[in-house]
Image: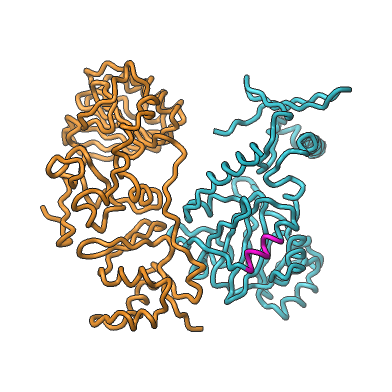
Chain colours: A orange, B cyan
Amino acid sequence: MTKDYFILHGNCIPVKGATRSIICDLQLGKYKYIPNELYDILNLSREHSITDLEEKFDLSEDGSLFHYFEALVKSGYGIFTNTPELFPVLDLEFATYSEVTNAIIDYNSTSTYNLISVIKQLEGLVCEAVQIRNFDGLNIDILEKISTTFSESSIPIFEIILKHDIIVEGRLESILENNSRFRYVIVHSSPVDKSIEIKNSKVHFTKKSIDSSSHCGQISSFFFTVNIESFTEALAYNSCLNKKISIDTNGEIKNCPSFEKSFGIINNTKLVDVLRNLEFKKVWKINKDQISTCKDCEFRYICTDCRAYTKNGGLFDKPQKCSYNPYIGEWEN
Amino acid sequence: MPDVITNIMAELNDQQFSITLKKGQKSLAARDINVIWYRRFQIKDNLNLSLEEFEKSTDSEIRRFRTSEKIALFRSLVYRLEDKFWLSHPDTAAVNKIMQLDIARKLEIIVPKTWIISSKEQLKEVLKIYPKLALKPIKDIRPISMGKKFFNQYTTIIEMDFLDHLNDEPFPFLVQEYISKDYEVRSFFIDDEFYSMAIFSQDNDQTTVDFRRYDYKYPNRNVPFKLPVDIDQKLKKLLRRLKLNTGSIDLLVSGDKYYFLEVNPVGQFGMVSSPCNYHLHKKIAQFLIKQDNA
């Protein structure tokens, strides 16, 4: 039986950039480059038969359109069918039940706020992931206290970045043996580079020094995430700041520790009250379509973002630490 | 987080029949419940016998007695909540595959030819005409543990050589004609709407017969699917006939034919919801809230 239509699978979404497009496979977590010409055709292929499309678009190079489609079927991105209307495109609405999904908590030796009470508040907000960052060394008793608090909490994902010291390294194994909720542990300023696994935790020791929050905001293809949740979130919201709450080393509650703007001191302000402040949620809505350069980039819905360190310092400028130029389709160094 | 009830207390006297569910300090009286989302009912059984006691023949009898007591308690709870809104009532949820197929057939829904086999000779006759058959349980899959091994009754293809493994009068089992399919469809029904997903499993030998034998390296393609209007209508009619207000329907699509396989009244919806981004958790919650306020 001949099939008159070609369609991309409903969870394979094409995204157009300035010079080329990609198809994001939100089920299998990968993407594929396609020429922009094909992007335009694919947008019509659910309503127009292959024959129709071949008439409308004269693809001089690379033979017929059919061969393009055949290659996409072979690589698993689409199918030939006679009933395209039965295979709708994925609903791209983003929804999550919790008001805050992730938190960054900076805690230094000079910090005076109560870290345990912060974790308890985040648990109450049904936060899914918490990252604690320490730049200048963490007292072992506090580390153990954090670990115990997390193992007793219902927060599923927990990461910690902390400065190396002999005592911490010595006790880390026994701490991780007792807490399977640490997903990542990064020990910076370490004498050696090494990666180990302890129970369910990945532990990376790095010689690099992470001495302040200014190390954040890296943009690279390494951090691309291709799945339904992050794609739909990036379509409508900021892919770094949406549903994020942060506390800097001084206990200031912020969207991101690297931001200037503070929404109060954690010692006398509840996180839930900050979340009621509409001003706080304003930056959540800055999606990539509003950011210069990013709005023309084919990676915009699978990429992370940074609003703290930007090219010209503007809130709507492209991230400073991004070296990709979508206008020539190349990473520049 | 769902609360697991730690106590069920019932009291029946001249004035009333009350049931109270408790967890720690929290308690919930049957009269205050409007809506029940029925999934499964379990009572943790702390029957803890020593190995010696366990091996005594009376043990299985003790277990049978306790099981029958558990069921009676469950029935009492259902009886007390009879006039409430149930998302899948336990009585209608208990309908088995062969009953469903017969009702579907009467509604002119295509179903695979189905036999229940209890003799070797009978199976031989069927295999002569249909050399490939799908073997599956009459009711549900029940994981059976034997020592450290687990056995699931996944759908299995049988052919003539299967007869070699059979005695003359085997324990009754169900077989269906093998349908060569283009793809499978799983449709979750809630609030008068189907949320469907097509599963392209035919390309993969491991999952061709039963997609639950997941292949993690080459996963099946799972995509949103919209039932053709006539199939949609017929299946809604079927659910009404089965008195189900929710359920998960399995279909096979072969050419322009839609074969109904079964409906699972307390089926999983997560496996449809997340690949298709249907947000079914939210839809179920909203539906229950709507009924609670009705």
Kindly report the secondary structure that dominates the magenta region of the rendered protein.
Answer: helix
Compared with A136, A234 (above or below) is below
Residues in magenta?
B230-237
- The residue at the point 45 percent across, 27 percent down is A124
Compared with A122, B55 (above or below) is below
Q: Closest to the observer: A69 or A97?
A: A97
Q: Which quadrant of the view contains residue B97?
A: bottom right
Percent position of residue B190, x then y: 61, 51
In-image side of B228 versus B83 (left or right): left
Percent position of residue B125, x then y: 77, 77
From this viewpoint, is residue A98 visible?
Answer: yes
Report if residue B80 lies within the magenta region.
no
In-image side of A17 versus A4 (left or right): left
Percent position of residue A325, x then y: 15, 56
- The residue at the point 68 percent across, 39 percent down is B36
Compared with A233, B56 (above or below) is above
Q: Which quadrant of the view contains residue B259?
A: bottom right
Where, quadrant-wise, is the C terminus of chain B in this rendering?
top right
In-image side of A250 versus B173 (left or right): left
From this viewpoint, is residue A131 visible?
Answer: no
Percent position of residue B71, x then y: 78, 38
- The residue at the point 65 percent across, 37 percent down is B292
